[in-house]
Image (tube, grey):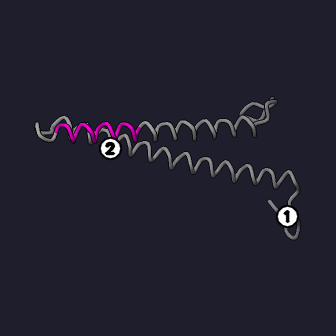
Amino acid sequence: MTPPGGTQSKREQAVDLTEATHRQYLDHLVDVYVSWREACGEVSETYANWQYAGRQEQQLAFGKYIAALNCEEEAATLYQHAMERLAAAHRITDDPGEGRDGRP
């Protein structure tokens, strides 16, 4: 936090940047999680459509189901990468000499 009428120290600027970066990572994580869950819903819906499709619609319904599976897989991969990125950021910013509660 900047003192009234003053400037931030380099450490305070680094902490602010780290907090801002962390918020961006979390925002991105939530976005890709929501996308993945929506893709999961699409898989369920297209599977049900395929399961109950008439003989003439089965091939098209199956194709839509496979496409939904592919989209879900891609969304899951994006979510995995976002989780890994956030975990890596925590490893970089955490002081290895301290536990999560701030004690050694």
Amino acid type, label 2 = Glu
The answer to whether residue 5 is left or right of residue 81 is right
Q: Nearer the viewer, mark 1 or mark 2?
A: 2
Residue 40 percent across, percent down from the top left: 37, 40
**63 in magenta:** yes
The residue at 69%/50% (across/down) is 21
Characterize the local packing of mark 2: few (<14), some (14-19) or many (20 or more) Cα atoms within 10 angstroms. Answer: some
- In the rendered view, tell whether residue 69 sits above or below residue 19: above
Residue 41 appears in which quarter of the rendering? top left
- Please tell me the numbered disc located at residue 65: none
Q: In this view, does 9 lie to the left or right of 20?
A: right
Estimate the spatial distance between the alpha carbons at disc 1 and disc 2, rounded to whole Å. Answer: 51 Å
Q: Name the residue under label 1.
A: 3
From the viewer's side, name the closer residue of 53 and 98: 53
Residue range of the region highlighted in magenta in the rendering: 58-72
Which type of secondary structure does the marked residue at label 1 adopt? loop
Q: Position of residue 38 (x, y in %)?
A: 38, 46
Residue to which mark 2 is pinned: 42
Q: Which residue is drawn at 69% across and 53% down?
A: 20
Q: Where is residue 95 in the image (x, y as percent from the top left)?
A: 79, 35
* SS assignment at label 2: helix
Tell me the crowding category of disc 1: few under 14, some 14 to 19, or many 20 or more residues within 10 angstroms, Cα based: few
Q: Which quarter of the figure has residue 55?
A: top left
**Screen quadrant of the N terminus:** bottom right
